[in-house]
Amino acid sequence: MKRLSVRKKLTLWMTALMLALVIVVLGFLFAVSSRVAMQSAQEQLESFVRGNLTSITMENDTLQFGEGFQFTRSGMYLLVYNASGALLAGQTPLSYPTSVPFENGLTRLVSDDQADDVYLTLDFWLPFGWDDGVWVRGVMQEPEVSDAMHRLLDISLLLLPLIVLVGGVGVYRIVRRAFQPIDRIVAAASRISEGRDLSQRIGLPPGKDEISQLAAAFDQMFERLERAFEAESRFTSDASHELRTPTAVILAQCREAEQHAKTLSDYAEAVEVIHRQADRMSGLIGQLLQMTRLEQGTVPLCLEEADLGDLAEVVCEEQRAVHPECTIETWLEPGVTAWFDVTLITRALQNLLENAYRYGGPRITVEVRREREDVALSVFDDGPGIPEDQQQRIWKRFYRVETARSGGQGTGLGLPMVAQIASMHGGEASVESRPGWGTRFTLRFPAVPADQKPAAEKD
């Protein structure tokens, strides 16, 4: 039994259950039929006896039987005994016992030890005066289950093996069909395991049954695994590609210091270069990890209702302290509240400001406004602008516009992170730029996310 497949186990169990149910139903029908037949016979016998009691009278010490009196009817016998138990009228069935005690008003079964016949017996005492009367006894043979029930039982016993066989085959087909989605789940998992192809999906049609829900859960799991694997692969590829240059610079400076540095200033210069490249590597790794977490969904959105203008004012004040040489102006529409993750939106605004400082002009403008059901956060700089053929590339990882103003080259991850944060809020990031006019980056997202609207309307 332990070596059998789940299909065969279910088939055997369900077939055995079906067999047990058939036997129970047949036994129940047989028992109910016998009980109904017995109750019907008792009612018939009582009606027969009571119907004849009114036709028996005593006149001049002689029993008189009325016009409607019947000694027999449909297998029922009526017997009349005196108080001493002597038979006065009627004829007993051949196998009926000769001496059966009288019990007034009680229907009971009576049988003879020497015969197999069993009789229903009902006695009534019919008094005539204070101390005289007769016993009136009704007798009929115990009813048997009808011939139809016997035939049904015989046919059922003959057909029982066929019923079990057909039922077992039907159950197996049902179980096999029910397990087909599980076969597809196993096959998809095997293909993924063998070919390392995480794009494989089970692809069952949507349904409300448990197996359809299981298949949908597996598809969601495969999708998350695919995203995680792609993010890990991208992180590994990006890190190995972008860290190659600073690592090479650090190694070159170490060799240069070992071979040619003679004074303390030579060593200090080498350490400065190494420190600068190490800072770049640290920032790059931190941003790569942040981007990977955002892509994998391991950084959950902590939505809260806040004033976007107040947030922008705080961030701009911090950036003024970091870059005092740069003028940051704000145009903040009052009362622009929205549901957003304060930490992520802060990070996005910092990235836009750093990008404007690095690639734009000395004057930066931050604007917060409401646009119908959305809120918009814009950062404008009066720099040289972005060439039209490069405006779509800036959202790709590690792409950097060649004309940087000052402050060193960035990592090329700031704008892709802004786009990712906007997407997580159900919005988008866009750019407007013309040579000689400047560049405006805008982060736009719904003021109230779809899953927060009922709660917000209730408040």
Image (spheres, rainbow, N blue to C red):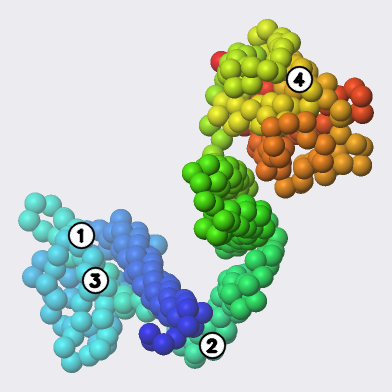
Figure quadrant of the N terminus: bottom left
| Residue at which label 1 appears | 105
Mark pair 3, 2: CA separation: 47 Å
Instruction: Please tell me how many numbered marks the rendered image carries.
Output: 4
Q: Nearer the viewer, residue 396 or 78?
A: 396
- Image disc number at residue 165: 2
- Image disc number at residue 362: 4
Residue plotted at (45% across, 80% down):
9
Quadrant for residue 312, please give it.
top right
| Residue at which label 3 appears | 121
State yes or no: discs 1 and 2 in contact (Cβ < 8 Å): no
Q: Could you tell me the amino acid type at mark 2?
A: Leu
Q: Is residue 286 left or right of residue 141?
A: right
State yes or no: discs 2 and 4 in contact (Cβ < 8 Å): no
Q: Nearer the viewer, residue 184 or 346?
A: 346
User: Could you tell me which secondary element the residue under label 2 belongs to?
Assistant: helix
Q: Could you tell me the amino acid type at mark 1?
A: Gly
Mark 1 or mark 3: whose residue is earlier in sequence: 1
Q: Could you tell me the amino acid type at mark 4?
A: Pro
Residue plotted at (76% across, 20% down):
362
| Mark 2, other Cα within 10 Å: few <14 / some 14–19 / many ≥20 | few
Quadrant for residue 122, please give it.
bottom left
Mark 2 or mark 4: whose residue is earlier in sequence: 2
Figure quadrant of the C terminus: top right
User: Quick one: which residue is furthest to the front in this view?
Assistant: 262
Mark 1 or mark 4: whose residue is earlier in sequence: 1
405 up-or-down from 234: above or below: above
Q: Nearer the viewer, residue 254 or 70?
A: 254
Q: Position of residue 366 (x, y in %)?
A: 72, 17
Q: Nearer the viewer, residue 424 or 6?
A: 424
